[in-house]
Amino acid sequence: MTTVGIIGAGHIGSALAEGLARRGYDVVIANSRGPETLDDLVGRLSADAGGSGASGSVRAATAVDAAQAADWAIVTVPLKDLADVPVEPLAGKIVLDTNNYYWERDGRIAALDEKRATTTGLTQAHLPSSRVVKAFNHIPAADILTTGSPAGTPDRRALAIASDHADAAALAAEVYDAFGFDTVDIGSVGESWRVERDQPAYVVRQNADELRENLARATR
């Protein structure tokens, strides 16, 4: 059974943990305060997954342990905490990056303010031996488990990915489909700004054609 390490237990991380456990994955989730602070969350997520008849599981661990246990991982932390994400345990692994830049929370980051970098590019630079793909950054957490639909559904919601690694992009597309979303591939990490905060494609419900149009309308 595939084990997914989730580093970050906020709204996005919690929703993805629940959705993955429902779909038969074993999830190891971590936050910055220690696994003992996640007892209530793990209990709720495990109950929700079990109630759906899923065969997956959720347990809490340190960030290092979650990274080590992972077959692939999700990094979903405030961008200001990116430096705390363990590097070596994620080497050689695919990492889905949901991070966004909120300067009000993260402080000013010159490379982003000056449009010299992207949030996922910063994650890839921090994890140089991992294969990073931007995913789930432009959907509200509450929509992750409620707005998906089966493949082929008319007007199916679409989400974007961006990666410099074909296998990472393929995995993200597979996960999107499992959660009920079509995929639009932006291309390289260098183009991932098109789905960042304040761009037309950010946190709006859109099908694949609409998403492509919004990505094309993005300005930097």
Image: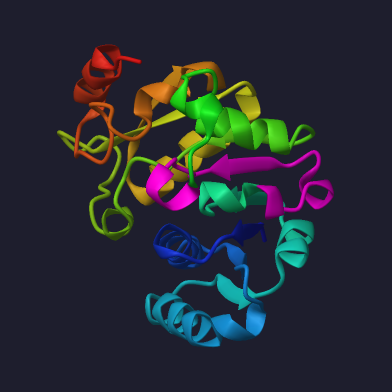
Residue in front for this viewpoint, 108 or 95: 108
Return the x and y of residue 17 as percentages of the image width and height: 49, 64
Return the x and y of residue 152 as percentages of the image width and height: 25, 35
Residue in front for this viewpoint, 90 or 207: 90
Determine whether 83 is above or below 197 in the image.
below
**In which quarter of the view is residue 194 placed?**
top left
**In which quarter of the view is residue 37 placed?**
bottom right
**In which quarter of the view is residue 198 placed?**
top left
Q: Residue furthest right?
A: 88
Q: Residue furthest left?
A: 154
Asked if residue 97 is among those painted magenta in the image, a careful observer would answer: yes
Return the x and y of residue 196 as percentages of the image width and height: 38, 32
Asked if residue 185 is among those painted magenta in the image, a careful observer would answer: no
Return the x and y of residue 139 as percentages of the image width and height: 31, 45
Screen quadrant of the C terminus:
top left
Question: In this figure, what is the number of numbered marks?
Answer: 0
Q: Which stretch appears magenta? A: 83-106
Q: Is residue 81 left or right of residue 135?
A: right
Q: Is residue 103 left or right of residue 96?
A: left
Determine whether 108 is above or below 111 in the image.
below
Residue 122 visible in the shown view:
yes
Residue occupying image coordinates x 56% and y 81%:
38
Q: Is residue 182 left or right of residue 83?
A: left
Residue occupying image coordinates x 26% and y 29%:
201
Residue occupying image coordinates x 45% and y 80%:
50
Residue occupying image coordinates x 42% and y 24%:
193
Screen quadrant of the N terminus:
bottom right
Colour scheme in the image?
rainbow
Residue 102 visible in the shown view:
no
Residue in front for this viewpoint, 157 or 56: 157
